Image (cartoon, rainbow, N blue to C red):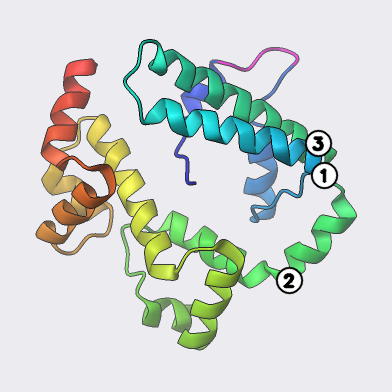
Amino acid sequence: MVLWVNPDFIKKRCTNGTNLFLCFKSTSKTKFNLLRPGSEMLGIIKNIMVKLDKSTTTISFGSNILKETYLTELIVYLNRAYLETCDENIEDDIMYDQKVNEIIHFINQHLDGNLSLEALSERFYTSKYHLMREFKKHTGFTLHNYIQKKRLILAKALLRDGIRITEVYQQCGFGDYSNFIRSFRNMYKVSPKKYGSGAKLKS
């Protein structure tokens, strides 16, 4: 599950004694994304994720409130998992996944650029086959699917901010307008135009 969280959402829920940005700031500094919670903590996080997923796919009374509540709960427990994680155990995985984490970081920072398999394999000095295999192994996504999902998540956020569709698809790295429309509809079950119009009405 991929979540795109507006930093303002987290900021509003921080208090003097609770900095919910803690785990994210660590990730930004070290350039890796890894948590290894214990079985009990993992069960808690999975349960929250299930509830969050259900709240985003229903229009039942109060589902919008529950969605924010579950998301806040998830961020709290992600920080707890971060604080409870054993640094020694993580260190070995960081070294093992270093190349993949570098690639993920590069992709996230260059969604509007050329992220073809050829371009990435050349930039990171690795064969295309090895890159595809290792990326799938450590992320669970194919390289193409990961990039596609990240671009569509960004597109959704830009549309919500009122950016025009003709600008959105270019900012998100979609070289073809019709491909963007088709991909967005397949993932969100609504056209970009309809989604953008609905977002404006809600604001």
Q: Is residue 20 magenta?
A: no
Q: Which residue is mark 2?
A: 96
Looking at the picture, which amino acid does disc 1 mark?
A: Thr
Give the structural element (helix, strand or loop) at label 2.
helix
Is 83 displayed left or right of 68 in the figure? right
- Compared with 92, 65 (above or below) is above
Residue 15 shown in magenta = yes
Q: Say what secondary structure mark 1 lies in.
A: loop
Query: Residue 200, position in %: x, y?
Result: 18, 22
Question: How would you rate the neighbour count of disc 1 (Cα within 10 Å): few for under 14, some for 14-19, many for 20 or more?
Answer: some
Q: Position of residue 42 (x, y in %)?
A: 72, 41
Disc sitting over residue 154 in the figure: none
Q: CA distance from mark 1 to mark 3?
A: 6 Å
Distance between mark 1 and mark 2 Cα atoms? 17 Å
Q: Amino acid at mark 3?
A: Leu
Which numbered disc, 3 or 2, marks the residue that appears first in the sequence?
3
Image location (x, y in percent) of residue 170: 20, 54
Judge whether residue 124 can be spotted in this image: no
Q: Can you identify the residue that label 1 sits on?
A: 85
Q: Residue 125, located in which quarter of the rendered image?
A: bottom right
Q: Rounded to the nearest whole Å, what is the CA distance between mark 3 and mark 2?
A: 22 Å
Find the magenta span and give its range: 13-17
Magenta segment main secondary structure = loop
Considering depth in this image, is 177 or 186 the residue closer to the camera?
Answer: 186
Please rate how many residues cluster around mark 2, counting C-alpha atoms within 10 Å: few if below 14, some from 14 to 19, many from 20: few
Say if 187 sits above or below 23 in the image.
below
Label 3 SS: helix
| C-beta proximity under 8 Å, tags 1 and 3 | yes
Q: Amino acid at mark 2?
A: Tyr
Against 47, is 200 above or below? above
Q: Does 52 sit left or right of 89 as displayed?
A: left
Residue 83 circle label: 3
